[in-house]
Amino acid sequence: MLLATKLERVFILKDKGQDIRLTDPEPRWSVEAVLNFYANTYPILTTAKISAPIIRDDRIEYKLESVMGTKG
């Protein structure tokens, strides 16, 4: 018998060389909505991009990467 479970989403922000794990404020929100929610606390997220999700340890991890200071 197969059992389906909903995986928890975790958002990882790399700031000053450290990984900051951000919990999912509302599972029904889109990833972009979560990014906008956390942009109030972490202004660097206003110019961030979202990487492809990675499934690790029964969680879906999204990396939020700032594009400030990069060329191209």
Image (tube, rainbow, N blue to C red):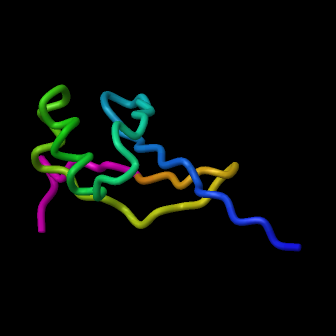
Judge by depth and name the residue closer to the eye, 43 or 35: 35
Residue at 18% in and 53% down: 67
Q: Where does residue 30 sit, x and y in percent of width and height?
A: 28, 58
Residues rendered magenta in the picture: 63-72
User: Front-most of 48 and 41?
Assistant: 41
Identify whether 13 is placed above or below 6.
above
Q: Residue furthest front?
A: 1
- Give the answer, above or below, for where 31 lies relative to 4: above
Rendered-image quadrant of the C terminus: bottom left
Q: For the N terminus, which image quadrant?
A: bottom right
Quadrant of the image occupied by residue 43? top left
- The mark total stands at 0
- Residue 68 is left or right of residue 50, and the answer is left
Residue 70 highlighted magenta (yes or no): yes
Q: Residue at x 59, y 57 (%)?
A: 6
Observer-nearest residue: 46 or 25? 25
Instruction: From the top left corner, tell me how far across and down residue 53 is, in percent.
Output: 46, 63
Q: What residue is at 82 percent from the left and 72 percent from the top? A: 2
Instruction: Name the main secondary structure of what is drawn in magenta.
Output: loop
- Residue 60: give x, y in percent of width and height: 53, 55
61 vs 7, left or right, is left
Question: Residue at 31% across / 28% down in the picture?
Answer: 16
Residue 31 counted in the magenta span: no
Q: Position of residue 62 (x, y in %)?
A: 42, 53
The residue lying furthest to the right in this view is 1
